[in-house]
Image (cartoon, rainbow, N blue to C red):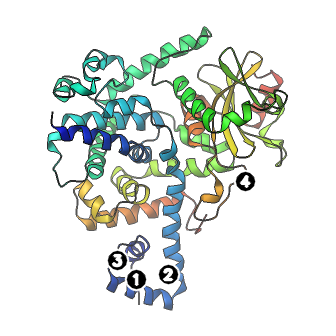
Amino acid sequence: MSIPDETLMAYADGELDAAQRAEVEAAIAANPRLAERVEQHRALRRKLNAAFDPVLQDTVPHALIAAAHGSSSGNAGATAKSGVASDRGATAGAAAERGATVTDLRRVRAARAAEAKEAAAFARRGETPRRAWTWFEWGAVAASVALGATLAHLALRSPETSRIGTQDGHLVAQADLAQALSTQLAVDQPVDAPVQIGLSFKSKAGDTCRTFTVKDQNVLGGLACRQGSEWRVQVLANAPPGTSSPGGYKPAGGSMPTAVVSAVEQQIEEGPLDAAGEAAARARGWK
Amino acid sequence: MRPATEAIRDQLVALLPRLRRFARALSRDAHDADDLVQVSVERALLHLDQLRPEARLDSWMFGIVRNAWIDETRSRKRRDNLLAPEELGEQVADSSSEAPIQRLSIEAALQRLPEEQRLVVALVLVEGLAYKEAAAVLEVPIGTVTSRLARGRATLEALLGGREGGV
């Protein structure tokens, strides 16, 4: 009996009624290749879950929560109105009031671009930007989440072994993390090195940045950028545990947290450095 | 407004992580995805009166995100005729360490799907909606959901390196 692939797919998705299920199961019993195909359909779903479910664990940006409450949307375009709307007791008429606010992506994006530009200017002057909707802020949020959950046990250990410390309000890599960031090349690092370097790239702000994973009690993933003589840690987050993936797949170095991947996507100027580019950057002292 | 509004806002906040996940499956960029969620939430609050009492808030919101995303991709296509953006995700995927490759390549593969297939894949496989629920969000017959899903899956499997089975 031939079973269309769409039916196998629907079976894998739990979409068939009892009679159809019985029919498919009979066919599968007669033909193991069909069982294989069902498993492939399920495997694809698992892959997508593994890729996107970590988003659920991310910190939701303040701007979104504010938007859901009908208050400040975190951009200049709506500021005047949101002052009124932010009083939750006064939500009566708030939506009507917001009716005058043009709601489209271009507005949100333009406001963000302006802020990002400003933030970049701040960064060049060595100051700390404060606005929402920039990767600086975003990174700080991610870092502060990590601070509660995981950074604490890294940072609060004895100073000699602490891999991350603070300097002038920035998180900076120390000890073997700083050492690895400065010396280790992704191509020839030992697989059992406590710090694994991921990719290296030039950021839009002109810095050299590198992703890393650190194996501690948990696997942490992070992004650090070279500023002067130190590695400033932009993002640090728990790597998704490989063991929880339904297929039992466990990535060698732990997979990179979504927060880190997003930060890379935001900051990367062109592409990642290749092996030669990485070695050359090291030779230049990561300038 | 109505007292119910307050409750809906709270439900919206609770729904944000799923809306972000859905948007992330649609949009190539994390910031774009959050922008999409923000715009959708703002639109939803403007049109709360259109939320039927028997409707599920999550389905309704997915529909709004979908509409906002389609509006955005239409206008983006017009802009992209002038400015071709780089395929950033693919570049990152090329030389990052092993695990991110897998994640990014799925994202990159999703980006290659036609809009309508990507929507179905995002609703059914990422968000876990039943075919019937996805059909309601997309306002198409259930058979259309099934065929789009089958084609989307086949394309993804081809892009992800064939039917190699489990990871």
Q: Is residue B167 left or right of residue B138?
A: right
Chain letter belonging to callout 1: A
Tag 1, which secondary structure? loop
Toward which corner of the image does residue B16 lie, by quadrant? top left
Q: Secondary structure under badge 4?
A: loop
Ranked by sequence position, the earlier of labels 4 and 3 is 3
Is residue B93 rendered to the left or right of residue A186? Answer: left
Q: The numbered mark 4 sits on a residue in which chain?
A: A
Spatial CA distance of label 4 from label 3 is 38 Å
Dot 2: chain letter: A
Residue position for label 1: A3
Residue type, label 4: Ala
Marks 2 and 4, how far apart in space? Answer: 31 Å
Point out residue A160 in the picture as x, y percentages from the top left corner.
85, 28
Precedes in sequence: disc 1 or disc 4:
1
Amino acid marked by disc 2: Leu
Q: Are marks 1 and 2 in contact (CB under 8 Å)?
A: yes
The residue at which mark 4 appears reads as A252
Earlier sequence position, callout 2 versus callout 3: 3
Which corner quadrant of the image does residue A15 belong to?
Answer: bottom left
Residue A118: x %, y % from top left: 49, 13
Labels 1 and 2 positioned on one and the same chain? yes
Q: Which residue position is annotated with label 3?
A: A16
- Front tag of 1 and 4: 4
First in sequence, mark 2 or 4: give its number. Answer: 2
Foreground mark, 2 or 4, reads 4
- Mark 1 vs mark 3: same chain? yes
Front in this rendered view, residue A45 or A271: A45
Q: Disc 2 marks which residue?
A: A34
In which quadrant of the rendered image does the C terminus of chain A lie? top right
